[in-house]
Image (cartoon, helix red, strand yellow):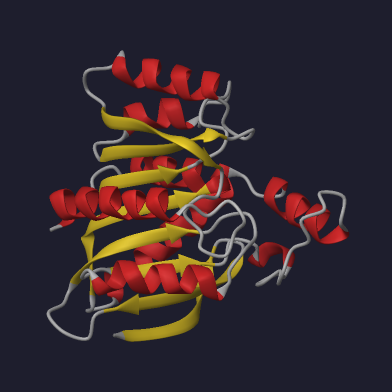
Amino acid sequence: MIEHQLDITTKDGATTTFIVHPERDGPHPVILFYMDAPAIREELRDMARRFASAGYYVMLPNLYYRAGVMELGPLSPDPNDPSRQKMMDLMYGLTIAMVMDDTDALVAYAELDPAADARRIGTVGYCMSGQHSINAAARHADRVKAAASIYGTYLVTDKADSPHLAARKAKAELYFACAEIDRWAPLEMVEELGQSLESDPQVRAEVELYPGVEHGFAFPQRPAYDKTAAERHWERLNGLFRRNLG
């Protein structure tokens, strides 16, 4: 495996991006891996390595670079702890439009790297970035062949860039993994998302409910981690990317 970290110039500065891909048999299809609210950490880098080991060129960008933040470190379980408030402020300081500008820069970089095949892109976003993954599929519809939202938040909103609307502009196969216990994406939102996508025959999407688990179930170092559900999500993602990226 080859991995490195570098700054990729964006419209608003530069995002420090972790890149990992196989050493042989390139160029490799690209996976844009959007971080969750607790920011970049070794846990996410390990997940990027797992994607890469299946034959992909994985890009994990720092989305908090505009605020001058790279890693937050350990977070207190106390919702009133200052570290938690800082995380929430950073999360709410991002917009989908900002992340789409960053996505443009990532795609442009991948186009110039001989190790990457930027004509075949998959996207995946966890937590706050489920919406980014789906919007990236709409923004780069001719390149993004598969997109996944894993316990994504704000899946149905009244904004023009709501994921349930962005899905209609995408050509990719879409996958939404939703936790049964999730205050950020309650069951009524999941049901509304499913009904919306099913109503459009042009949308290729699956909304899967993971019973009995909580938001964050895929992260090994989170209290909500559930090994069975986590491995199911890896199975679903591997199948999604294999079908559409090769």
- Give coordinates of residue 108: x percent, y percent: 36, 65
- Give coordinates of residue 193: x percent, y percent: 44, 22
| Viewer-side residue, 141 vs 212 | 212
Classify residue 30 by image quadrant. Answer: bottom left
- Give coordinates of residue 54: x percent, y percent: 22, 68
Q: Is residue 91 visible?
A: yes
| Viewer-side residue, 55 vs 103 | 55
Give the quadrant of the C terminus.
bottom left
Q: Is residue 143 visible?
A: no
- The residue that appears at 57% across and 24% down in the rendered structure is 157
Q: In the image, is residue 24 above or below residue 154? A: below
Q: In the image, is residue 85 above or below residue 141? A: below
Tell how many labels: 0
On the picture, is 18 further left or further right than 27?
right
- Give coordinates of residue 95: x percent, y percent: 62, 45
- The residue that appears at 23% across and 45% down in the rendered structure is 142
Give the quadrant of the N terminus.
bottom left
On the picture, is 242 further left or further right than 188?
left
